[in-house]
Image: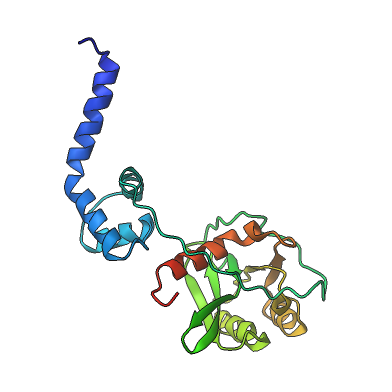
Amino acid sequence: MDISKSSYCYQHKIIYSKGKYEVTTNEIMHLFHKNDSRYGYRRIYALLKKQNIIISEKIVRRIMKENHLVVKIKKTKKYSSYIGEISKAAENLINRNFHSDKPNQKMLTDITEFSIPAGKVYLSPIIDCFDGMVTAWKISTNPNAELVNSMLDEYHKTLKNGEKPIIHSDRGAHYRWPEWINRMNRYGFQRSMSRKGCSPDNSACEGFFGRMKNEMILV
């Protein structure tokens, strides 16, 4: 049977690759199903790293794709605090550029809602674009101004002298009330807001909420 050299080399590479990562693939499949199909490639990569299994995120992602390991996404209703244009909206300084060269340069915030047996609770975190980590957060059974204001106060305590980040949010009422605006001005923070009804403008924050809820048993 005639076969070109390039085709032969390509097929050989695929076979070698599958054999090379056979043990790792089995472990990835085990971890994925063990966690009820809720962990994406980044979380699986972190678990492998804890087990001293050295492999790149890119390879983990490829193996999961080849083996159809797709995270189950549970659609949840997004909490919204938008009640109209109650004050002037801030300019969209982030403009979907979520890359940051250093910590406390670009920060994202929003409110998300959880339903638990005892009722509803609301989480207000602030997320650093530099590494995707939550720097400060507050949780409450009441999505009032105190929820976001106290979170901002806690975040301010973590900063070094001279750090004046951009704080990006949607156009919800919490980020347009005087208490929030006064705090932002007092701390020297720059306000940034998504465009009206444009969730992709804060997609990095919403993506965090989605991943968190997928990995939590209570949702």
Q: Which residue appears at 68% of the width and 86% of the height?
A: 145
From this viewpoint, is residue 158 visible?
A: no
Q: Answer with the quarter of the image where residue 152 lies.
A: bottom right
In x, y percent, where is residue 18?
Answer: 22, 39
Residue lying at the far top of the rendered structure: 2
Q: Answer with the quarter of the image where residue 165 lies.
A: bottom right
Q: Which residue appears at 72% of the width and 69% of the height?
A: 171
Q: Which residue appears at 24% of the width and 29% of the height?
A: 13
> Split into 4 quadrants, where in the image is the N terminus?
top left
In the drawing, does residue 71 fall left or right of residue 5? right
In x, y percent, where is residue 134?
Answer: 49, 72
Q: Which of 164 and 71 is in front in this view?
A: 71
Q: Is residue 207 above or below residue 111?
A: above
Q: Which residue appears at 63% of the width and 84% of the height?
A: 143
In x, y percent, where is residue 28?
Answer: 26, 54
Q: Answer with the quarter of the image where residue 125 lies.
A: bottom right
In x, y percent, where is residue 27?
Answer: 21, 55
> Split into 4 quadrants, where in the image is the C terminus?
bottom left
In the drawing, does residue 207 fall left or right of residue 45? right
